[in-house]
Image (cartoon, rainbow, N blue to C red):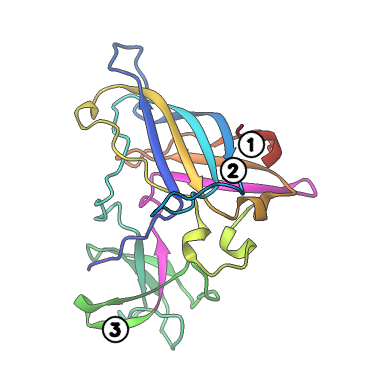
Amino acid sequence: MKLRVAQISIILVTLTISGCFDPPEFSEIPYIEYESLRFVEIPADYVIPDGGTRPVDSLVLSFSIEDGNGDVGLRDNESFTPYHSFNLIIDSRDSLVTYTGDFEPPFYTIDPLGTREPFSEEDNRPGYNCTNYIISSFSDLGVGQDTFYIQQNEFHYNLHVSILRKRNGTYSPVNYAEASGNADCALSSFNGRIPVFDESNIGRTLKGDISYSMRSSGHKIVLARDTFKVQFYLYDRALHKSNVVESPDLTLPDIISD
């Protein structure tokens, strides 16, 4: 089964890694710590160079990482299991479940290797959204373009970032596509892939810093008048999950770069 790799359109990853060093030994489960979040705003009077394009505002998340065996990072072309982007949903008759149509529960997930797992005992399809559906075609399966019901694969991205907006003392995740009324599914998540740090360092201790830039013209629209924080975690190549980290409460004016 050939699966379309989800596009990452709002991220830029930069890495700073310390050189190889002797113990202290670290766990093989990644450990991360929040360092800072900066808002980089493009000035209104920015002059676009000839043939260039206007840059986009960014939230730049910086954090430190420790990993005992250095197996952190995914390559862009790694779309095979377990790093594939999503599982398809099939019904009890092995039919691919789509947004419309009648299907016979129970439902199962099926990955690119053909492995099926129980998904739901009933037809629980939600309304259309960017998380649960994909518009695509699967010619190798003899299926034309349709809107397919899917299950996102948690391990397709190794860095998971949520922006939590605070209102009336309660935090809730912000979906930029929904908050800005934009139908572009690329705006629905800031998750991304941290690339392989150093091929020769896999299997050896890793300690360093990561800066991860989330580019979007919607930051000032969505977060302009709110207090918010970021929550994030990371997977290594062996699918070990790091600790979950949160920033303190922030506002855009507090973190704007000079």
Query: For the residues carrying marks 1 and 3, which lies nearer the camera in this image?
Result: 1
Q: Amino acid type of disc 3?
A: Gly
Please tell me which residue is depicted at 42% across the width and 79% down the height of the picture: 105
Query: For the residues carrying marks 3 and 2, which lies nearer the camera in this image?
Result: 2
Would you say the residues marked 3 and 2 are in contact, meaning their CB atoms lie under 8 Å apart?
A: no
Q: What residue is shown with label 3?
A: 144
Q: Earlier in the sequence, mark 3 or mark 2?
A: 2
Would you say the residues marked 1 and 3 are in contact, meaning their CB atoms lie under 8 Å apart?
A: no
Instruction: Give the x, y percent position of residue 249.
Output: 69, 36
Name the quadrant containing residue 16: top left
| Residue 161 falls inside the magenta stretch | yes
Please tell me which residue is depicted at 64% across the width and 61% down the height of the picture: 179
Whether residue 84 appears in this view of the structure is yes
Determine whether 70 is above or below 169 in the image.
Answer: above
Q: What residue is shown with label 2?
A: 41
Residue at the limit of the structure toward the front, as seen here: 50
Q: Earlier in the sequence, mark 1 or mark 3?
A: 3
